[in-house]
Image (cartoon, grey):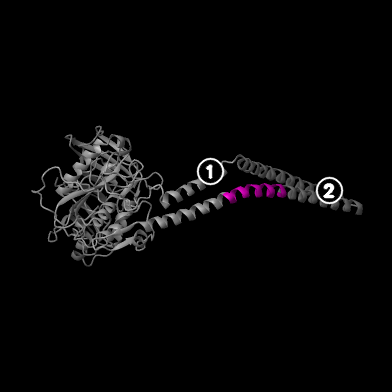
């Protein structure tokens, strides 16, 4: 499974620490290994149709006990219906092995699924359901009509009693008997319909009970199978410690592993390295093929490991290795003063640098605009930060000095009366068709729960996100563009730029949806709002550094 580089690597220094997998620039050795893996994939003609749909691959640079450098390769999930291919490392556990418990139990569950479908499509069951529906409607019509006749007859008797000065005893008795007879007829009609409907319901329920019992059996067997399967994924780390997926995910919010956990490229690579006494030095994962419909992936681009499936696993598997620090936890320009673009006694607008948080994150020691302005204005009241910019985005940020001003400005955002304009540089190197000069993008967005903080397009769960744009210039490789967001969803401009249903080319430096660079080339250059005290329109602009 080890591969030796086809060219000399003696001039390339080894990494000092292992790659931080959730935010990285690929090491030169990883880039070379990736190119060799890509060349191999190109030769596999039989895979091309499947791979065009998209798949994540990974490489791991390793060193043996004689300090010889080589690399391993892996793919996420399975490929061509198999987990085992000679060029790639094997899975942690091969759930596709024909005689394994997973395939055997999966066949049993498939049999249950087939039985459920058979019962749901059974002509007798469908006929009974239709009869029940029809007869229920007929019963409603018949009883409603009978009840109306009963009421009309009662009113006729009351009218007769009032219109005749004095009814004889015999006439009174006759009216009472008539009432009793008609009520008895109605009750009898009710009983007949009830008896018929109960019989029909019992016939339908017999089918539905059988279906529900099968569904419950399927659910229980599936849960037991998943539990047993996850117990087979016994993940190693550099210390030689072993934990199965059930144990690893007990420490997470959801407590149970998500489907596909342990089958991504990097866990496979690390597991193989540890089993064969190979020291992991660096990693990289890249996408091959078209982008999925919901997520954003570009052919050949590097991507960080996913958070939902891989983060808990890698937290265990990387123990014992010296790993690079998360660059997002490093304070940028700690001694740099925030540039104030506008200020009065009520509010201020600052030019937030790329790489600084708007508000504090999970790690309190990481620098943020909020912390800076709180220190500078200790007597200010309220939340201060009126809106946010992504950590990687630079530009104009509006800050209130009082709670009342904050509420007034927030109301303007909620009512969409504040105007904002962003400038960006797009990576047009792989754009298949030119972008229109002007346009409007509407793609509903929501959080990808298995890969935070990534957002995804979802017609079912996404919230409306609207962006208008204007292309300023296009040089082929780069496109300079203005964005006018009409809504303020997380990563809205980044997704609308990168997604195939949007512009189809990511913002330069967008490592979440495109390719990492020295910064994200997105800048909030203009903001226009109504001053909450003076009532006049404030228009501010700060040109981008790029």
Magenta span has 459?
no
The reply to whether residue 393 is in sight is no
In percent of width and height, residue 39 lies at 21, 38
- Closest to the observer, 304 or 105: 105
Instruction: Give how far across and how far down residue 258 sits, in percent.
Output: 37, 54
Q: Is residue 533 left or right of residue 544?
A: right
Q: Within 10 angstroms of label 1, few (less than 14), some, or many (20 or more) residues? A: few
Q: Secondary structure at mark 2?
A: helix
Say whether disc 1 or disc 2 marks the residue closer to the N-terminus: 1
Q: At x 15% / y 51%, what residue is drawn?
A: 69
Q: Find residue 167 and name its label.
A: none
Q: Residue furthest bottom?
A: 379
Would you place residue 380 above or below residue 265 in this image?
A: below
Which residue matches tag 2?
160
- CA gap between label 1 and label 2 equals 62 Å
Front one among 308 and 426:
308
Q: Which image quadrant for residue 137? A: top right
Q: Which is the main secondary structure of the residues drawn in magenta? A: helix
Q: Residue 274: tell me if it is visible.
A: yes
Q: Name the residue furthest top.
A: 433
Is 174 situated left or right of 249 in this image? right
208 inside magenta stretch: yes
Q: Give SS at disc 1.
A: helix
Mark 1 and mark 2 in contact? Answer it, CB < 8 Å. Answer: no
Q: Nearer the viewer, mark 1 or mark 2?
A: 1
The circle on residue 117 is 1
Residue at the spot 60% in from the left edge and 41% down from the top edge: 126
- All told, the count of numbered labels is 2
Badge 2 density bin: few <14, some 14–19, many ≥20, Cα 10 Å: few
In the image, which residues are magenta? 194-210
């Amino acid at each position: 499974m080890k591969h030796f580089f086809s060219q000399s690597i003696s001039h390339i220094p080894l990494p000092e620490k292992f790659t931080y997998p959730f935010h990285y620039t690929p090491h030169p050795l990883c880039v070379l290994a990736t190119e060799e893996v890509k060349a191999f994939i190109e030769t596999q003609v039989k895979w091309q149709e499947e791979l065009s749909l998209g798949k994540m691959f990974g490489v791991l640079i390793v060193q043996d006990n004689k300090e010889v450098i080589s690399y391993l390769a892996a793919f996420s999930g399975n490929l061509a219906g198999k987990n085992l291919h000679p060029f790639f490392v094997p899975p942690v556990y091969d759930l596709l092995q024909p005689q394994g418990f997973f395939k055997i139990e999966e066949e049993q569950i498939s049999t249950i699924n087939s039985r459920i479908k058979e019962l749901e499509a059974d002509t007798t069951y469908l006929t009974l359901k239709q009869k029940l529906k029809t007869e229920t409607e007929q019963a409603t019509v018949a009883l409603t009509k009978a009840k109306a006749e009963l009421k009309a007859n009662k009113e006729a008797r009351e009218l007769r009693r009032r219109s005749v000065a004095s009814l004889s005893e015999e006439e009174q008795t006759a009216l009472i008997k008539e009432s009793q007879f008609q009520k008895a007829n109605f009750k009898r009609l009710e009983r007949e319909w009830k008896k018929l409907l109960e019989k029909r319901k019992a016939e339908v329920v017999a089918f539905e009970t059988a279906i529900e019992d099968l569904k419950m059996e399927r659910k229980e067997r599936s849960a037991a199978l998943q539990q047993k399967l996850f117990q087979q994924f016994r993940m190693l780390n550099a210390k030689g410690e072993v934990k199965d997926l059930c144990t690893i995910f007990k420490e997470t919010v959801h407590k149970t592993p998500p489907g596909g956990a342990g089958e991504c490229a990097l866990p496979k690579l690390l597991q193989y390295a540890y089993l064969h006494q190979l020291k992991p030095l660096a990693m990289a994962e890249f996408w091959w093929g078209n982008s999925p419909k919901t997520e954003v992936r570009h052919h050949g681009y590097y991507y960080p490991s996913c958070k939902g499936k891989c983060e808990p696993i890698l937290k265990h598997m990387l123990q014992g290795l010296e790993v690079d620090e998360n660059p997002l936890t490093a304070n940028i320009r700690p001694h740099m003063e925030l540039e104030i673009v506008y200020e009065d006694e009520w509010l201020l607008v600052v030019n937030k640098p790329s790489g600084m948080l708007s508000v504090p994150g999970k790690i309190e020691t990481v620098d943020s605009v909020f912390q800076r302005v709180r220190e500078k204005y200790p007597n200010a009241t309220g939340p201060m930060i009126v809106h946010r910019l992504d950590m990687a985005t630079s530009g104009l940020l509006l800050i209130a000095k009082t709670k009342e001003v904050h509420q007034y400005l927030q109301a303007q955002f909620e009512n969409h009366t504040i105007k904002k304009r962003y400038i960006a540089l797009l990576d047009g190197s792989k754009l298949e068709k030119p972008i229109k000069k002007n346009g409007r993008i509407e793609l509903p967005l929501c959080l990808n729960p298995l890969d935070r903080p990534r957002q995804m397009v979802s017609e079912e769960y996404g919230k409306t996100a609207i962006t208008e744009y204007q292309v300023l210039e296009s040089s082929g490789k780069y496109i300079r563009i203005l964005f006018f967001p009409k809504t303020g969803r997380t990563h809205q401009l980044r997704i609308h730029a990168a997604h195939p249903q949007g512009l189809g080319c990511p913002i330069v430096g967008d490592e979440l949806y495109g390719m990492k660079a020295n910064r994200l080339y997105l800048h909030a250059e203009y903001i226009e709002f109504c001053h909450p005290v003076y009532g006049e329109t404030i228009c501010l602009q700060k040109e981008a550094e790029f």
